[in-house]
């Protein structure tokens, strides 16, 4: 009896679901795993539904999180959108709806009955799952660049590029952008773990240090503009609202505060504007040097010209590392996708179209939308996008209409307001303040990132969405509980 109760408690535990689901979603973004996560993710689909159903009919903990009623309203809006578009989107809408309510009522709420120590321990374990998984994936990916490995494999209805391809590092991820943003998240979560466990952000263990090195290399080789924007926003907020107040609190001399602030800004802009370019230039010679080294020790046959081995003194081949050609369109084709999406929104202004993948299964025409109101370019861009509008705000509009956009915007604005008020209550830069501020700035940075990507809502199995909603829930929990003022958790 006790064992069965333990199993039941484990299954119905939100934190257990979050950790398993996070790991599986990380693997989901790695095509070279050959979909080993496919069936476990289906189990999670029904597992999450079970947790919600049991909680709804028993404790109703999911209705104790702040502004839960707005999330219920958002769920009803999207359900109504699915019903209105039932002829074309019933199955897909129902599928999306289950993931939406799973995010709202399992990932976001923090159990109010948990102790502070339990919440912190679950938080650090959640962080480590992402950090360790991303470290292994990043290490494999960087090695693929070093040995200049690149290939294409089937991935669902499409194909996935892997390794170093088209002048960017995809690694074992679905795209360079995904690998880069995961790497950024892993570094921020490492900082949070240090603050929680040790009371300072900079005492990294050896694995965390190795991970930071790997993720910096991946970011440079991936040339991800979205992640670059995210880093810029996060860093600027952290400098202005954490670093400078810390200097003011620590040093009585104004000249010392000003000097150190200038040094921080100088370092920030030097790294942002020049250092990464220098590193990229140096890294471009690495695959060629490794190739020559392998040839010299006999592991790999030398390249031949006219049947004769090339000279050992030949120049080192340099690979090109860049986001896109110099004459490429600045948005990498996003502007035309956004324009096509807006033209579709005009046809479904109130409740949206439920799902934007109109040309699923490579159909030539879609009867849900009035194609006569779209240009040929619009239709081609909707096909190319595969339902990903590369902008969360447009994604929300096209899937839930103006009504859904307004509802979720109210929810977010209320959270932003609460967190700004909460942060300004602090008089000193305590551990509590640093953790709260870092999480808040991470969320703001992800809003900026989603100007050019679409992660935080209406994307099933999305790691960034899981992190975003979990930490949004933690923030509102921290506002009620003084989580860190009594010291750090035991090692």
Image: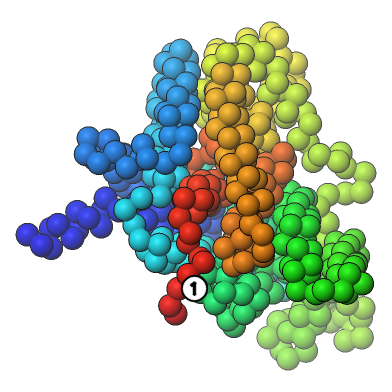
Left or right: 475 with respect to 305?
A: left
Left or right position of 433 against 250 = left
Residue 98 lies, with reference to residue 155, above or below; the image says above
Q: Which residue is mark 1?
A: 488
Q: Residue at x 42, y 41 (%)?
A: 65
In this view, the residue in front, 58 or 220, is 58
Can residue 345 be seen here? The reply is: yes
Q: Is residue 316 or residue 60 the one in the foreground? A: 60
Position of the C terminus, as image quadrant, is bottom left
* Colour theme: rainbow
Q: Residue at x 71, y 89 (%)?
A: 298
| Residue 399 position within the rendered picture, expressed as x and y whole percent measured from the top left | 56, 25
Residue at horizontal 72 percent and vertical 39 percent from the top = 451
Query: Which element type, helix, strand or loop, lies under badge 1?
Result: loop
Q: Would you identify the image quadrant in which residue 426 lies?
A: bottom right
Closer-to-camera residue (471/365): 471
Which quarter of the rendering shows the N terminus?
bottom left
Answer few, some or many: residues within 10 Å of disc 1's Cα (few below 14, many 20 plus, some between 14 and 19).
some
Instruction: Name the residue nearer the viewer: 447 or 438.
Output: 438
Residue 202 sits in quarter = bottom right
Would you identify the image quadrant in which residue 364 lies?
A: top right
Residue 128: horizontal and vertical position, in percent? Answer: 49, 68
């Amino acid at each position: 009896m006790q064992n069965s109760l333990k199993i039941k408690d484990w299954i119905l535990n939100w934190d257990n679901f979050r950790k398993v689901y996070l790991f599986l979603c990380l693997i989901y973004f790695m095509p070279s795993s050959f979909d080993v996560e496919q069936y476990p993710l289906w189990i999670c689909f029904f597992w999450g539904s079970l947790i919600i159903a049991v909680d709804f009919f028993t404790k109703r903990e999911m209705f104790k999180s702040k502004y839960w009623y707005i999330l219920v309203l958002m769920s009803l809006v999207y359900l109504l959108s699915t019903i209105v578009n039932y002829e074309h989107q019933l199955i897909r809408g129902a599928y999306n709806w289950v993931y939406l309510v799973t995010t709202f009522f399992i990932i976001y709420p923090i159990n109010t009955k948990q102790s502070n120590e339990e919440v912190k321990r679950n938080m650090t374990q959640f962080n480590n799952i992402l950090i360790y998984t991303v470290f292994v994936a990043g290490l494999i990916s960087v090695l693929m660049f070093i040995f200049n490995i690149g290939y294409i494999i089937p991935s669902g209805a499409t194909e996935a590029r892997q390794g170093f391809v088209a002048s960017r590092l995809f690694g074992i991820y679905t795209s360079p952008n995904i690998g880069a943003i995961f790497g950024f998240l892993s570094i921020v979560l490492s900082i949070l773990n240090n603050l929680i466990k040790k009371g300072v952000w900079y005492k990294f263990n050896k694995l965390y240090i190795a991970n930071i090195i790997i993720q910096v290399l991946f970011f440079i080789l991936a040339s991800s503009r979205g992640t670059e924007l995210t880093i810029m926003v996060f860093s600027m907020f952290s400098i202005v609202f954490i670093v400078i107040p810390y200097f003011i609190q620590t040093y009585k001399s104004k000249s010392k505060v000003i000097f150190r602030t200038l040094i921080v800004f100088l370092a920030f802009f030097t790294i942002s504007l020049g250092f990464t370019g220098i590193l990229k230039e140096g890294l471009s010679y690495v695959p060629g040097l490794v190739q020559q080294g392998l040839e010299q020790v006999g592991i790999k046959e030398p390249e031949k010209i006219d049947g004769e081995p090339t000279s050992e003194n030949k120049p080192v081949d340099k690979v090109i590392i860049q986001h896109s050609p110099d004459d490429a369109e600045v948005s990498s084709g996003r502007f035309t996708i956004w324009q096509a999406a807006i033209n579709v929104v005009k046809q479904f202004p109130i409740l949206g179209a439920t799902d934007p993948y109109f040309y699923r299964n490579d159909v030539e025409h879609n009867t849900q939308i009035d194609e006569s109101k779209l240009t040929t370019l619009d239709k081609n861009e909707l096909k190319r996008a595969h339902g990903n509008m590369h902008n969360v705000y447009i994604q929300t509009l096209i899937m839930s209409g103006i009504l859904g956009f307004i509802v979720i915007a109210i929810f977010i604005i209320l959270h932003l307001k609460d967190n700004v008020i909460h942060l300004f209550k602090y008089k000193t830069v305590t551990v509590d303040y640093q953790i709260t501020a870092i999480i808040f700035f991470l969320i703001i940075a992800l809003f900026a990132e989603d100007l050019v990507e679409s992660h935080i809502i209406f994307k099933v199995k999305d790691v960034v969405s899981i992190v975003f909603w979990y930490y949004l829930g933690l923030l509102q929990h921290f506002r009620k509980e003084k989580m860190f003022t009594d010291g750090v958790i035991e090692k």
